[in-house]
Structure formats: C-alpha cells, structure tokens
Image (tube, rainbow, N blue to C red):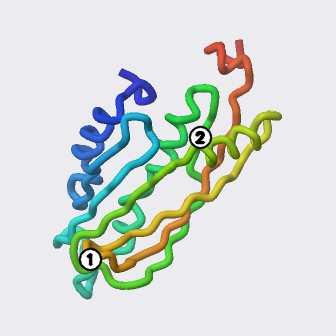
Amino acid sequence: MSRRSMSPRALRRAMNWWPPYLFSGVRVLHIADDWTSARVRLRLHRFNSNYVGTHFGGSLFAMGDPFWMLLTMNRLGGDYIVWDKTGEIDFVSPGRGDVFAEFKLTEDRLEEIREATADGGKALPWFEYDVVAADGTLVARVRKQLYVRRKRPDLREGRDESA
C-alpha cells in the first residue's frame, strides 16, 4: 500500500507506532475520514521533558509537524506536489501536562491554493495552530509554510519526465 493510498485510520495507527512519535509521547487521536482535520496529544514524561521539567520545545514542534502537509496533500490529490517549507514556534507558557493540537483544513483554503497554482506556479501558504494544555491554557503558537505546485502534465499521467 502506498502512503498516498493509505486511509486516514491506517495512517493514524501507523503514526502512533512510528518510533519518533511512540517514544516521545505523541498520540494521533483523530484524522478525519475526509482529511479535513486532525487532533494530536503530547504527554509529558521523562523522554520529552526539559531541564526544568516542562515539555521540550522540539517535542512541542514535532507533535504537529506533518499534519498540514498530510491534510493538504490528501485533499488536493495526486495532481499536486506538497512539501513542508518553513516552520516557526512561539513559546507562550510552560507545558506541564498533556498538551493538544488541532488542525482544520477548510475548502476555502484549498480553493485559494488551487487558484494560486492554476497557472503552474507555486503557492507558499502559511497555516497556524495552537498547542494548548488540557485546561485550555495556550502553550505555544506554531506556524508552518507549505510549498504547493501542480505537477506538470507528463508527471500527472504517471510518465517519467526523462522518458
């Protein structure tokens, strides 16, 4: 089964057994059947806490790292190239327990990307999400930028461009 043909449920299960997530305490709680949303939890334990006993910043960033790309790639389909380009995180308050992140990809946002790439050019959309504690306290704000471009017609048809 190719990654692109994996169902949201199968991908969620695979990600929960993926060693970087499994050992850092990340749990993918939900990926919508239509690829419009996802929800992730990060538990605090000794493998992901920093010197002062709060969540390690790298774990806070990693918990949500792939989701905008995965949701966008699966919603747009195989006619598009989608890559992570840039990311940034603003630490707002210490994470001392379970923290959560939610991702919601709207059809309006996808339409903006389709319009921006219709002429064969690239789009560099920014996406944002918050990392929040169980009580709703904001722990971090994260921004991710994607690179999105329509594939050339010869690649869309499954032919190698060098052929």
First reached walking from the N terminus: tag 2 or tag 1: 2
Residue in the picture at 42% in, 47% down: 37
Q: Quadrant of residue 65?
A: bottom left
Q: Residue furthest right?
A: 119
Residue type, numbered disc 1:
Asp
Residue in the picture at 62% in, 35% down: 81
* Residue 147 x %, y %: 65, 47
- Please give left or right for residue 90 compared with residue 115 in the image: left
- Please give left or right for residue 61 compared with residue 81 in the image: left
Q: Which residue is mark 2?
A: 82
Q: Residues within 10 Å of mark 2 (few under 14, many from 20)?
A: many
Q: Which residue is mark 1?
A: 135
In this rendering, the answer to whether 45 lies above or below 35 is: below
Q: Quadrant of residue 155?
A: top right
* Residue 149 x %, y %: 69, 38
* Residue 106 x %, y %: 55, 47
Disc 1 on helix, strand or loop? loop
Residue in the picture at 50% in, 77% down: 90
Q: Quadrant of the C terminus?
A: top right
Q: Quadrant of the N terminus?
A: top left
Q: Nearer the viewer, residue 36 or 19?
A: 36
Residue type, numbered disc 2:
Val
Cα separation between marks 2 and 1: 34 Å
